[in-house]
Amino acid sequence: MGTGTGVDSLTSTRRALAVLDCFAADAPALTLSEIARRLGRPVSSTHRQIKELVRWGALERDESGRYSIGLHLWEVGALAPRSKGLREAAVPFLEDLYEATHENVQVAILDGTEVVYVERLFGHHATRIIARPGTRLPLHATGVGRVLLAHAGPELVNEVLAGPLRRYTEYCTVDPRALRRELATVRRAGYAISDRQFELVSTSVAAPIRGAGNNVVAALSIIVPARDGTARGFVPAVVAAARGISRALGARLPRPADLPESY
């Protein structure tokens, strides 16, 4: 009897998580029928599941009948230790970097074979970007992703480079050998410049953030317009901000060497 209850409970949990997985940055609000269609389930059983999620606060229903992620779920998610301490340490340095540049600045962490953005500051007149807290993007085509992949273990690097690697723009590196060389350069230089790899309108300058054990726990980036020769000028500020966050997290960093003249 106890085993059966456990199976039923696990099934119910998986169903609830599947409902939540229906929501994404390009689908922040969905109707009941849209959720049922995405799940491939009857509307009646989906409705019962959604009612439970609304009651707990994982979902909210607006006046038009559409559902979105609830505030209580956001409150619980904000307690995740991987992002909470990092965000608290990063925000003052993000604010300084934004005030100095008035460009979009953001912090991301590694999760599986993707990056997850946990914090960002942006201006109305800065370069348009799609990343927001909670957004997942590929490792190979983003500045923060390249930094995190460059400092990842060989198993993850091999898994990512085994592909398939999507070519987002004509400038996006998808050849595994070329990408492996670029990752080696990122490790050696201490920063990454991802020029129009993900979007044609923008270039990312990123640097690693280290934790108390000096291991890379996140990456910081600034997104600037894709204009030839301007991105490199942001490297010192990005690296300095990343080092400041690292020290706030307890990292013991050596004195910074002069930044390379070439990348």
Image (cartoon, rainbow, N blue to C red):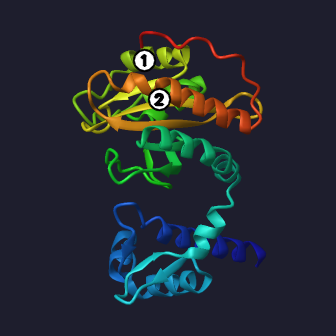
- The residue identified by callout 1 is 182
Q: Which residue is painted at 52% across and 39% down in the image?
A: 97
Residue type highlighted by circle 1: Glu
**Residue 217 on image: x %, y %:** 64, 36
Q: Front-most of 109 and 167? A: 109
* Badge number at residue 146: 2
Callout 1 secondary element: helix
Q: Front-most of 209 and 178? A: 209
Residues at discs 2 and 1 in contact (Cβ within 8 Å): yes
User: Badge 2: how crowded within 10 Å, few (<14), some, or many (20+)?
Assistant: many
Quadrant in the rendering for residue 223: top left
**Residue 4 on image: x %, y %:** 70, 75
Residue type highlighted by circle 2: Arg
**Residue 150 on image: x %, y %:** 53, 24
In this rendering, position of residue 25 left or right of residue 10 = left
Q: Which residue is painted at 66% across and 33% down in the image?
A: 244
Q: Which residue is painted at 74% across and 30% down in the image?
A: 251
